[in-house]
Amino acid sequence: MLDALVERVKNFFGTSRPAEQMVRTPVVIPKSVHGISRDQVAWQALRTCEALQSRGFKAYVVGGAVRDLLLGVTPKDFDVATDATPQEVKRCQRRAVIIGRRFRLVHVIFGREIIECSTFRALSGAGVRRDAEGRVLSDNVFGEMWEDAARRDFTINALYYDPKTEELYDYHHGFEDLSKRCLRIIGDPIERYREDPVRMLRAIRISAKLGFRIDRSTERPIPKLARLLENIPSARLVDELLKLLTCGHAVACIGRLHEEGLQKALSPLLHTVLSDPEGEKFFMLALKRTDERLSIGKKISPFFLFATLLWPLVLRRWRYNESQKGMSRLAAIHEASVEVLATECHQLSIQRRFQADMHDVWMLQAKLERRTGKAPFSTLQHPRYRAAYDFLRLRSQAGELPEALPDWWESFAESDEDARRTMVEAAQAEARSTAEAARGGRGKLAAEAGEKPRRRRPRRRRRRPSGASSGGNPS
Ligand code: ATP
Ligand code: MG
């Protein structure tokens, strides 16, 4: 795909790059050269453009979608740029909402699909508010198409596709850079990073995702400017962190973040986890698996990623609560989970529903150790069983557990009722015999998994302290 593109670019431009930057006048690239056809564009984006164009406005598909289509990659989403104001866009579309205060945009809604429609932004103006470092805080001053192009981050992200004429408008040699697999920022790199330091993270993500090199002058200032990320609201950073981890090339992104010295500035927690060999091994394995899942079109859940990121902290507290406070396995992990969620989730802006899922996956790690009695049957029915099993498998791959435990669960889940009962009886017998052989010591598997042999104790009635809720029971 790319070879054909390189050939077409060479034929179109010749071998040398035009000397002058065509800032106000774009190069118009015909379909015979760029190769994108209208039916590769999502119908929702086509309809959004049609509605605007039929009312006399300009409307183009822009950004990552055009870039990805040129590279033969399926676009994640489609963005549209127009000269219509947000109110005018809203009037043209059946379902549309204006969002954002600092940067007003329109979301054109088609069921679950959303087309983000932005009005051409002016290059600079009285309406642009900046902080002391030069960071743009708000701007809703609208301008010309060429200004909008100059405001975009990278040359390959500033290509405009007109679905009506099927022509491509290129202001900053994006088409050529694409064929050279080069990520180049538009304008002065330092100034552009100062305006929005998140562009440094975008450079890492986009170059890792596409396997592009970052142009030297685009890359050079990054390590020095990494500190500017400290001024970015944490919710936006967490958003970027998630995008990096779920772009399908997370392992490559982590490597590049490290090289550019951006890890700590992006997330001190990520930096801490990756600085500890045990934590690094586990988290990188999780990311490798995430990349693999995405490459075969499987879904991944943000809560799972957060659960893996915070696991080293939970594990440490779990061990401590058990060995130092004498708590049971289940009570110890419950307390560890509650503590970690309370201290870390606020910083990471993790939504409440994700927190509940993370807690479940962690608690199930202790429950998956129980392979006797009725416990395995109810564990298997848990709505988070599948995620918890995947988590257990990861822990064993990282060397934290023997493989036999996830293997056992894999066969248990695949067996019918009778076979499951036989498996539980066998596990029970095994636990009894190893317990007897070790005279109250631990069975190999159980010990490595942290399972305690069950001792029969006379049942004692427990009184619930007044005012305590049953929610305090970790099980
Ligand atoms: P993808 O959607 O695959 O993650 P993308 O490049 O489309 O990549 P979006 O966040 O969807 O990323 O942004 C759409 C477009 O908006 C970009 O291609 C770029 O032109 C512009 N853009 C986004 N963020 C910035 C930014 N921080 N500074 C300048 N332009 C930006
Ligand atoms: Mg996009």
Image: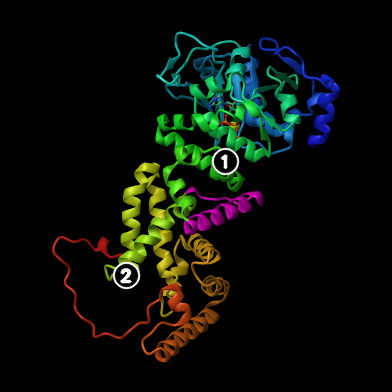
Reply above or below: 223 against 393.
above
Element type at marker 2?
helix
Would you call the spot at circle 1 few (<14 residues within 10 Å), some (14-19), or many (20 or more)?
few
Q: Is residue 453 left or right of residue 52?
A: left
Is ligand 1 closer than 8 angstroms to the Cβ of mark 2? no
Q: Residue 451 falls in which quadrant of the image?
A: bottom left
Residue 323 image label? 2
Measuring from the top left, give residue 53's x and y in whole percent.
65, 16
Tell me, yes or no, if residue 110 can be seen here: no
Reply above or below: 294 against 398.
above
Element type at marker 1?
helix
Measuring from the top left, give residue 178's x and y in whole percent.
72, 29
Q: Could you tell which of marks 2 and 1 lies nearer the N-terminus? A: 1
Dots 2 and 1: beta carbons under 8 Å?
no
Residue 259 image label? 1
Looking at the picture, which amino acid does disc 2 mark?
A: Ser
Region of the chain picked out in magenta, as a range:
277-302
Looking at the picture, which amino acid does disc 1 mark?
A: Glu
Q: Is residue 342 left or right of residue 191?
A: left
Measuring from the top left, give residue 444's x and y in whole percent.
47, 81
Q: Looking at this view, is 461 or 446 the one in front?
A: 446
Quadrant assignment for the N terminus:
top right
Q: How much space separates mark 2 and mark 1, taking CA atoms?
A: 39 Å
Reply above or below: 287 against 211.
below
Q: Looking at this view, is 23 or 420 the one in front?
A: 23
2 vs 1, front mark:
1
Which residue is at 41% across, 29% downward?
Answer: 231
Total numbered circles: 2
Question: As drawn, which residue projects farthest toward the left?
Answer: 466
The secondary structure making up most of the magenta span is helix
Q: Is residue 43 left or right of residue 416?
A: right
Q: Verify whether residue 279 appears in magenta.
A: yes
